[in-house]
Every structure is written in C-alpha cells, then in structure tokens.
Image (spheres, coloured by chain):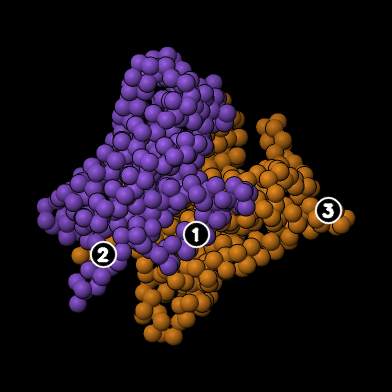
Amino acid sequence: MPPEMLFLAALDGIAYGSLIFLVAVGLSLIFGVLGVLNVAHGSFYAIGAYVAASAVLAAAGMGLPTWLSFPLFLVSAILVGVVVGGAVEALLLRRIYGKEEVLQLLVTFAVFMILEDAQKVIFGVRPLFANAPMNWLGTVEVFGIQYTVYQLILIPLVALAVLVGLRLFLRRTSFGRAIVAVTQDREAAMAMGINATHVYLFTFIIGASLAALGGALSSATTSLTPGIGSGMIVLSFAVAATAGLGRIEGAAVAALMIGLGRSAAVYFAPEFDVLIPYLIMVAVLLIKPEGLFTTLQARKV
Amino acid sequence: MSRQLIVGALLLVALVVFPLVSPWSTVILTVALCEGLAALGILILLRAGQVSFGHGLFFAFSAYVVAFMAAAKFGHEVLLLVPIATAASGLVAALVGLFIVRYRAIFFGMLNLAISMVFWSLLEKLFSLTGGADGKRVPRPTLAGMTLEREAFEFWMFYITLALAAIAAVAVARYLVSPGGKALEAIKTNETRLEYLGVSSRKVLYGAYLLSGLLAGLGGAIIALVSGHVTPELAYWVRSGEFVFIAILGGVGGVAGPFLGALMFQIIRGYAAVYAPETWHAVLGVMLLIIIFFAPTGLYGLIAGRRRTAAAKEGAP
C-alpha cells in the first residue's frame, strides 16, 4: 500500500470519526449523568438529519443564500434536542430512574421503535438529498484528489469545538459543575441545593442535541434513508463502550480509532468496513472489559 | 406450578383444535410458534435480568443454514434440516456466549445487538453468497421421505412445530425450577452473593445463553421451511426487538407466556396491517410502554392470576 493511500485513508477516517464522536459523546454524557443507556439515541441522529435537510431544502426553495444552512444546522439540532429529547426525558425517563437497567433499556427501546416510524410518517421513505452546503464550501486538492472542505475541515472543527466546549462547560461553568456533582453523588448534590431534575433534563437535551447535530452535519454528505438511526446507535455504542461509558475525552479517542480503522477498511477491504468498528470494540473489551478509560469500581455486595 | 400446567394445557388444546376448525390458520400459527420459541429463549435470559436485542442472529443463522442446505440438495429432508440448523445456531451461541456472558445488563443487551447487526450487514453485503437483500429461496423439502403438496406440508409442519414447542416449553419449565434455573434468578437479584456460594455465574449464564440460542435457532429453521424464503430481515434489529416485545407482552412468569404473547402478536400484526400499515412498529412501541408501566406481568400474569404478586406481598416484611 502506497503511503499516500494511507494518508488519504487517514483524512477520511478523521472526518468520519468526528461525525461519530458527536453522536457517541452525547450517548456517553447521558449515560454518565443519568445512568441510562438511551437506545433511542440513534433516532435523534436520524431526526436531526431529516430536520436539517428539510430546512436546507426549504431555505433553498425560498431563494435564501446557501451560507444560511450552517446556522440552520445548529438551530435544527437544538430544536430536535429540546422538543424530542426534552419530551422523552420529561414524559418517560423520569419515571424509571433507579429501576432495573433492563427496564430502562426496554423503555428507550420502545421509544426507538416509535421514533423510527414517526420519521417515516413525517419525512417519507424516499431518499432525501441536500448537499448544497457541502458544495458551497468547495474543495481542496490533496495528493491530486479533490476533498470537500466540508468533510475535511468543517466537520472535524465542529467536533473539536464540541470536545473543548463540553470540557470547559463541565469544569468551568456553575451549571456544568452541578452536572458533574450530580453524576458523582446525587443525594449529596441535592442536599447542596442542586436541582437534580433540572440537571437530568438539561443533560439529556444536550446529549440529544449533539446527536442531532451529528445528524445535521451528515445530512449534507449522504442521502437520507429510513434506518440510518439504527446503524448509528450500534456504532455510537461501540465508540462509547470502547472508551468506557461516560468518558467524554475517551469517546474522542475511541471515535478517532474507529473512524481511522473503518476508513482503512474502506480502502483495503471494502466488504468488511462494517465489521471493523466492532472488531476494535471486541478487541478492546476482551482486554479491558470496562473500556479503555474507565477505572475499576468496587462491587456492592 | 399447577397453574402453569393448566394455562399451558389449555393453550395446547386450543392450538391442537383450532387448525382443524379453520385450516387457513396453519401458517400463521406456525409462524407464531416459531416466534414464541425465540421469545422463550428471551424469557430465559430475562429471568437472569438480562435482555438481548440480538437474538435475530440465531434465528437468521439457522434459517440461512436451512436455505443453503436445501439449495445444495444436501439433506433435502425436514427431519435432517431442522436438527442440523438448530445445532448450527447452537454452535454460534456457544461461540458468541464465550464473549457475551462476561457482560451484564447494558453491555449484554447492546453487544448482542451489535453482533446481530454485523451479521445482518454481512448478509446484505455478501451478495454473491447470500443473495443480498433479496435473500434466498428455500425449496420445499421432503417430510419423513414423503414429497408433500403445499397444504399437506403446512398442515404437518404445524403439528410438528406444536409438538416441538410443547416439548421445549416443558423442558424450559423444568430447567427454570432446576438449580441452574434458580441460579439464574440469583444472577438477577444478587450476583456477588451467588458467587460467594461457590457458583460460577458465568457458567450459569452461559448455559442459559446456549439454550436461548438453540430455541431461537429452532424457530428460525422452521420459519425458513414454512415461508420458503429467507431474507436478511430475519437478523435485523426489528426482528430481535419483536422477540423481546413478545416475551414482555406474554409475561415472564411462565413458559406459556411467550406463546400467548406470540399469538397476541399475530393478532396485533393482523389489525395493524389494516389500520396502521406504515406505523405498526410505533404501535408495538406504545404497547410495550403500556405493558411495562401498567401490566408488568404480561398476559400470562393476567391469566394465571395474581398468585405470584400476592405471594410476594405476603413474603415481604
């Protein structure tokens, strides 16, 4: 394999890894704070993609300039997070905190089934394609191959901004520190006057918005078909599990690993590209069952 | 136990009689039994407090084994195909189980989902081998050496499936009251204490996983024969989710539960096909939420009465 090919595969991998990082970090954050693994997380990704694509197409239909797509991405991601994510947390998840994990899985799985069909009803089953924002940013040439600025620069930049922003938010702002406090000891945090209900709701909305943002960004690069959410939930779980559930910086490393692994597979063994993320996950979990970045916890008898 | 026997016997009698009265129902009932078998496997895992969103893997694997064997004219005989395909998916369960019994709850459920999704995408992508999304046709094999017409084949397949399901249900019921089955419940309540008793919880769960894989495999093998066609959809998460739905709908209190659930599932599917063809999985999701929040014992619990909950209340301090 020539070195340029490796380099190109690496560029692809970074773009792809950035996208799954956005989704996986939301999943991981929600798990870290609420202790619930949200199976419906893939649906937030898919709904974010559909809403963003519809908004971009509608804006183009009204003759608005293309650059407006980028703020639209952000707006649709937050909209999906607040409306869909907020409703799921407030109406359902709130009833099952502290119950068995299996029950929590089942409830979010039921939400997943409902949202998957809701997408089909609202957005139809025909492929939706809105790549104007990607074309608008143009291309750069690397080793004689045209790359879109959108995938090569914009998506990784957004992922980096999310990583740094999330870190600063959790460590420096008072609300972020309240989230961390609730994660570590809910009762003690509540005794200090932190409203855990608000923290849970807000965290869930952030997590859902991040998934929707990932979806919105991806909507310009591929055509949207029903079922993209189910692929994404397993993939983002693979990333979150490889890193250790609840690890934010770890999710970035794992997403990059899996992104690079997968794009290498696309170049060298295209039939098996779907296998690579899981092989990486299984390999990591065999050696470190709790994920790469988790410290062992004592068992309660 | 006695109530379990009564509910099971009534269900069995109803199932024996019903196709004689209305012959059109054999295929639907056979499909229900196959899904009931897979849901029975889910029930075993639920007893241990684990849920698998990936049992479509075993269901589809044995269905494809049947399809490949039937297409290769090798073992063109039901009495050979079903045991071999079931054993093959048991083998897969034995392999996957080695890895998966190390995990509990979230990881257990999601790793099952991940493995089944890998298998699904391989079925779709390796077009030259598996026929891709179109799947493979399964030519109708002989039954005990006889070449049967379609209707006679479906008729006999139903009663064979019913007999196998009854045997499986009784076997699972016995397993659940055996020390191995009781240890499963201990995994759910307190695994660490189980280990202090000197019982390896991994071994216990491994046995349960193997059994649940075999049950799903048996269901998959028969459904391939009866529907005459296999597609990657058998391994898709939707399918695995349906098994979980059936198990929860039927209730995990007794082995008749999954079969009750599977019959009810067919009825829901029938109505949904008329009234909500596009959104019927959403209907399932809503029902799942309703069952979880308002009728956690499922159909079996509603039919077999509140003895279990009453006993639990008396036992509580």
User: In the figure, is residue B313 to the left or right of A75?
Assistant: left
User: In the figure, is residue A157 to the left or right of B108?
Assistant: right
Residue found at the very far front of the displayed protein: B21
Tell me what hue chain A is rendered in. orange
**Callout 3 touching callout 2 (CB < 8 Å):** no
- Residue placed under numbered mark 1 in the picture: B287
* Residue B152 x %, y %: 44, 25
| Residue in the image at 34% along x and 52% along y | B257
Mark 1 neighbour class, 10 Å CA radius: few under 14, some 14 to 19, many 20 or more: some
For residue A57, above or below residue B219: below
* Residue B159 x %, y %: 36, 33
Q: Check chain identity for marks 1 and 2: say if they share one.
A: yes
- Residue placed under numbered mark 3 in the picture: A60
Marks 3 and 1 sit apart, C-alpha to C-alpha, by: 40 Å
The quarter of the picture where residue A79 lies is bottom right
Residue B303 is tagged as none
For residue A36, above or below residue A90: above
Between discs 1 and 2, the one toward the N terminus: 1
Q: Amino acid at mark 1?
A: Met
For residue B125, above or below residue A291: above
Chain appearing in purple on the rendered image: B
Residue A121 seen by the camera: yes
| Residue in the image at 62% along x and 52% along y | B276
Q: Amino acid at mark 3?
A: Ala
- Residue placed under numbered mark 2 in the picture: B308
Marks 1 and 2 sit apart, C-alpha to C-alpha, by: 23 Å
